[in-house]
Amino acid sequence: MISPLLNLQMLLGGAAAQAGWAILAFGSIFFWAFAWNADLTDWRYNAAQFKQTAGEVLGCEKTKFSVGGSEHRAGTPIYRTLYRYTIDGHTLESASYATGACADTGPTSIEYAPDHPEVSRIPGMRRNVFGPWVLLVALLPAAALIFIAVGLRRGQTRLRLLTAGVPVPGKLVEKAPTLTRINNRTVYKMTFQYVAHDGVARHTAAKTHRPERLEDEANECVLYDPDNPAKATLFDSMPGKIAIDESGQLQARSRAFLILPLLATLGNLWWISRR
């Protein structure tokens, strides 16, 4: 038996899942700040069918956004131009955006979607802060979701092996350094040999920057799937630390694996609540 918290540790505590949650927490900041403010008018509506009407510029103001810039040079500010226009007797107000430019107060031309008169803009300007190119920042959250999905898939395998796997001794047969380093420590690929119930010797490998965890015993515990003996993992390579309580139930010894998922989830909920 394993505790509910340990279930979550197996699903969320793996390297792929943790990396995904970290990227999601970081990437979501850029998604909500930039991609959410992208002008997708030309994608959602047929701009070729827009009609034009007369309008009036009410004023212009600088937004908190800018384009370009560096440590030593300020970026070009993005301005919001406010205007109003009348369609079929209804007066509508809206705003258009442009980088480094404001429209002059007074009469102006307005283009709008015939089927959605509220969808409008000053010709040459945008309906939102950024153009569609800013959607590139959505690649970060997308990559994060892929990492999380892979992590959850691996977590399901770990759960299967932890609950139904057959324990057998595993002997270290190869320890090879990789090109990866974590916390300034080399990551090693460590290969163990084990013999399943069918008498066939097989191998399973784990990558870790803490090889001492897999070298502290003459034989490490390997868990293999009784329905598929080729599928196996090392008990000590499971994410996080595992303890056994007085009733013999496996328990998670730490809750640190919850920090990144909670940070990413609560952060996104906070951004959504502000919209």
Image (cartoon, helix red, strand yellow):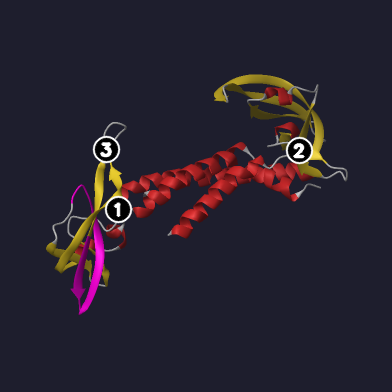
- The residue beneath circle 1 is 129
Q: Which residue is mark 3?
A: 74
- Which one is closest to the eye, mark 3 or mark 2? 3
Tell me which numbered mark, 1 or 2, is placed earlier along the sequence. 1
Residue type indicated by callout 2: Ile
Q: Residue at x 68, y 23 (%)?
A: 211
Q: Amino acid at mark 1?
A: Val
Vertical placement of residue 81 versus 154, above or below: below
Identify which residue is drawn at 59% across, 46% down.
Answer: 261
Q: Which quadrant does the C terminus fall into?
A: bottom left
Name the residue: 71% across, 22% down: 212
* Mark 3 vs 1, N-terminal side: 3
Give the number of the mark in front: 3 or 1: 3
Residue at x 80% of width, y 24% of height: 219
Q: Is residue 61 left or right of residue 244?
A: left
Decide: is 13 above or below 214.
below
Mark 3–mark 1 Cα distance, whole angstroms, equals 18 Å
